[in-house]
Image (cartoon, grey):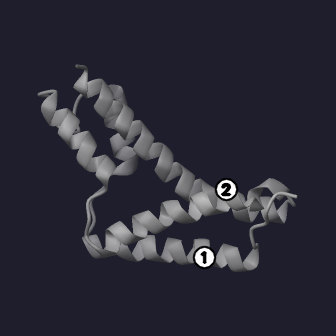
Amino acid sequence: MPYRLLADAVLALHVAIAAFVLLGLIVVVAGNLRRWGWVNRLWFRLAHLAAIAVVVAESWFGMLCPLTTLEMWLRAKGGGPTYAGGFIEHWLQYLLYYDAPGWVFTLVYSLFGLAVLATWWLFPPRRKR
């Protein structure tokens, strides 16, 4: 079984989710300033809120993200070194993983989560008409 390829796919999914969380907030604010109605669709806003809520909860409870756990397991199962190797591994990991004390991540994730909640107050989501 191509464990390293699966590990790369999990890493790509992880980066995509992280991008959705980060860019989602930017899109909600910019979209409301530009009067894009779709950015306030309830399904989009709930998905975005749920994504950051999971990140904040994992951080507060000191949990490792299940995607990280799965990726590391696949890499170990494939017999390859973790976070070394091909292009996908190198660059996507560089974007997603960096060194800082745990409390820094908890603080940043919590503040970002509060910013997402603030957009619910400033730009309330709407059901599709």
Residue 97 in picture, x, y percent from top left:
32, 51
Residue kind at label 2, given as amino acid type: Phe
Q: Which amino acid does label 1 sit on?
A: Leu
Left or right side of 83 for 46: right
Task: State the CA–CA distance, disc 2 to disc 1.
Answer: 14 Å
Tell me if residue 94 comes above or below residue 122 in the rendering. above
Image quarter in which the C terminus is found: bottom right
Residue for badge 2: 44
The residue at the point 26 percent across, 43 percent down is: 70
The mark that comes first in sequence, 2 or 1, is 2
Nearer to us: label 2 or label 1: 2
The quadrant the N terminus occupies is top left
Q: Residue 118: name its quadrant.
A: bottom right
Q: Which residue is drawn at 55% across and 58% down?
A: 22
Q: Mark 1 points at which residue?
A: 117
Q: Which residue lies furthest to the top in this view?
A: 1
Measuring from the top left, give residue 81's x and y in whole percent.
14, 33
